[in-house]
Amino acid sequence: MKVTRIAYSARLNSGKYAALHEQARRLGRVRSEVWQRFGSLHGAGVRDRHVRDRWMADGTAAGFGVTANAWKETLRDAIADIAASRESAKVAVRRAIARRTIDPAERKRLLAALKCERWADEAYLSRQMRKHWKRGKSRTRNQIIVRSDKVRTFSLTDGGNVWLAVAGVEPRQLVRIPLNTTVAPSGTLRLILRGGRVEVHYQIPASEMKSSRHPSGDREVGVDKGYTEVLIDSDGRHHGARLGALLTAESDRIKERNRRRARLRSIANNAAAKGRHAKAARIRANNFGTVKRDRQAAKHHAQVRTEIFTAVHRVVNEAGVVVAEDLTKAITGRRSLGKNLNRRLAAWTKGVTAEALKNVSERRGSALVLVNAAYTSQVCPTCEGLARRNGDRLHCTPCGVVWHADHAAAINVLRRYGDPDITLFTPYKRVKEILQERADRRRIKLPIQDSSPATGAESELSIHALPSEV
């Protein structure tokens, strides 16, 4: 398994950036040419070496205006992207084959033809591929692929930041890029130009990551993913408590920025309608840029990922088995929460949390188990019956206990681990029936409770059911 690291340029002057931008623009033409010719059914089975030899023979490569290694690596990368898009289309085709065929031998034959790229000879497979594999396009104009033997790294001082020397547009012309790291990138590099700086993407084995050298704990811990915090474990501890503040602040900032931009856009349109085109051009030129916007977005994403991965590491420090909800389905039923809350929830990074749980667990040797998420935050852990949720509180009328909803959900998630009745794919309606049946059986065995006001001991129980952090 490999992971991607990113290094950034530091104080790169405009001349070097312009040279790299021109090279990326010319390589973008190569990428577009590859997608135009081979990004459809005619590209099935095409190999980058065949295209490379053909272009060198007919003189097509001479018109690219870049070095041979640069366009060859771009060609290889584009062909790989086309193959990935074709493989994603095959997923839907395999489902169609399973629905259409009953005979196991015929199904096996069609699947083998699909895998071996012989689907063009089968009328049914050809129709399905035309249906699910659409012609693609490439508008990428800001990437340069550098082969590992065509890059040189050096430092001006011992222990100083690394410099990267890559080939320019002309042969034997090097562009030296100062980086903000003391770790030299290795392997094949992908240079991405954004907002006046260069991002250097490269891969390293996961075993070299620092987290892989720190083993996980040995407990079984259930976690519930939240908005105000990254995770709440089954012990009631909150991890990543800054997440909600980060998401809310960024969402509100974007709302205010877009409001101001809309006002300026209206002023520019009114000025253009009245014939004051110079004023409209000045407003559009000086107020609708994307460099600052992209940098702010990148900074916010980095802060969110840091908060999430740090929280997951804290959980894995104690957990040999992490039990989490499967939240792959879309969230519904948020329309009545108000537009501001809906806007903030739209930025909820549950996908990043799921990615962090998966990657950190693999690197540190813990097991990640996904369970059915239905009604986990609506079941009282004390009596295992359905309770009434009000905000972040879960009120259980039969046992008189008030739980923090996310803490209760983490406990219920842990109990779902190994549940023989509620599996990962059990429909939510069936989950509700199972929970109600269990609550009814438990209620029959319990003695009839007194309807008098709660005693001091019962009141103390209700208070201590809430975690101390709340």
Image (cartoon, rainbow, N blue to C red):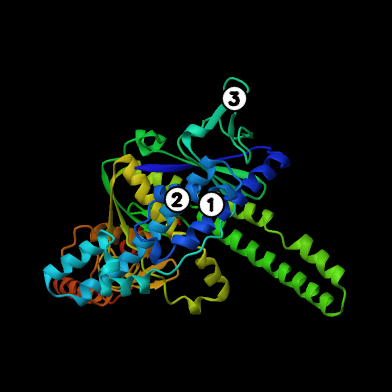
Q: Nearer the viewer, mark 2 or mark 3?
A: 2
Residue 90: x and y in percent read 31, 65
Asked if marks 2 and 1 touch (Cβ < 8 Å), the reply is yes
The residue positioned 23% from the left and 70% from the top of the image is 426
Quarter of the image with the C terminus is: bottom left
Question: Of 21 and 30, which appears nearest the observer?
Answer: 30
Mark 2 vs mark 3, CA separation in Å? 41 Å
Mark 2 vs mark 1, CA separation in Å? 8 Å
Q: Nearer the viewer, mark 3 or mark 1?
A: 1
**Would you identify the image quadrant in which residue 440 lies?**
bottom left
SS assignment at label 3: strand
Query: In the image as oriented, which residue stretches furthest toward the top?
Result: 158
SS assignment at label 2: helix
The residue positioned 64% from the left and 43% from the top of the image is 20
**Would you identify the image quadrant in which residue 465 lies?**
bottom left
Give the left or right position of residue 203, taking residue 99 as reference.
right
In this rendering, the answer to whether 457 lies above or below 437 is above
Residue 415: x and y in percent read 24, 59
Asked if marks 3 and 1 touch (Cβ < 8 Å), the reply is no
The residue positioned 44% from the left and 62% from the top of the image is 39
Which comes sooner in the sequence, label 2 or label 1? 2
Question: Of 58 and 338, which appears nearest the observer?
Answer: 58
Mark 3 vs mark 1, CA separation in Å? 39 Å
The residue positioned 28% from the left and 77% from the top of the image is 451
In this rendering, the answer to whether 432 lies above or below 87 is below
Mark 2 is on which residue type? Answer: Arg
The answer to whether residue 300 is visible is: no
Mark 1 is on which residue type? Answer: Thr
Q: Residues within 10 Å of mark 1 (few under 14, many from 20)?
A: few
